[in-house]
């Protein structure tokens, strides 16, 4: 399970230090994908397998566009010996990442946000929509 919020910097080569608590939950190989909300998602191999199985449980005709979008934009990833993740330029551009980034735990995945994008996302935390979602989930 991934939890927490960590402010980090991305170096000129597109490398981001992954917090130790996050590294411990990642498999040796993991998957990097575009998130729905203009963030980057990092999935352990076991979670990526669940995503693949979920798509496989639906008709390929019904999910072909979503499936292509998800799997064609994803990459396998590893951390270097210093615990850094290298993000390809396509991911940096998609999420609008600059030097300062926020690494966020989101239960089954890790999200990487621009500081501006994360600040915008946090505006939703104190509204009735989140309250309704939590009540609907039984909290």
Image: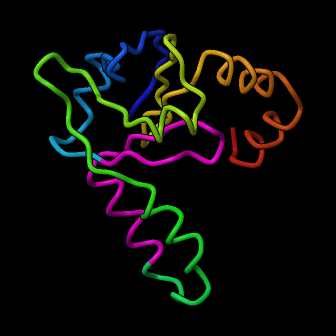
Judge whether residue 47 is colored magenta: yes
- Residue at (66% x, 41% y) in the render: 37
Q: Looking at the image, is 126 positioned above or below residue 107?
A: above
Residue 123 shown left or right of residue 52 in the figure: right
Judge whether residue 34 is colored magenta: yes
Res 77 → quadrant: top left
Q: Is the image coloured rainbow, by chain, by secondary structure, or in one colour?
A: rainbow
Q: Position of residue 65 (x, y in %)?
A: 59, 75
Q: Looking at the image, is 25 positioned above or below residue 5?
A: below
- Residue at (37% x, 15% y) in the render: 12
- Residue at (51% x, 47% y) in the render: 34
- Segment tinted magenta in the rendering: 31-55
Q: Position of residue 36 (x, y in %)?
A: 63, 48
Q: Looking at the image, is 29 positioned above or below residue 47?
A: above
Question: Going by the picture, which residue comes out furthest to the left?
Answer: 81
Res 66 → quadrant: bottom right
Q: Position of residue 72 (x, y in %)?
A: 43, 63
Instruction: Give the quarter of the figure containing the N terminus.
Output: top left
């Amino acid at each position: 399970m991934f939890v927490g919020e960590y402010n980090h910097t991305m170096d000129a080569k597109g490398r981001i230090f992954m917090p130790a608590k996050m590294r411990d939950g990642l498999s040796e190989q993991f998957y990097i994908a575009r998130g729905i909300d203009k963030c980057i998602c990092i999935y352990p191999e076991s979670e990526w397998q669940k995503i693949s199985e979920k798509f496989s449980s639906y008709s390929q005709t019904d999910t072909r566009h979503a499936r292509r979008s998800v799997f064609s934009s994803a990459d396998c990833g590893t951390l270097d010996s210093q615990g850094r993740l290298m993000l390809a330029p396509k991911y940096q551009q998609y999420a609008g990442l600059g030097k300062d980034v926020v690494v966020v735990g989101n239960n089954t995945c890790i999200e990487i946000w621009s500081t501006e994008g994360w600040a915008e996302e946090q505006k939703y935390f104190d509204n009735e929509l989140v309250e309704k979602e939590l009540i609907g989930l039984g909290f």
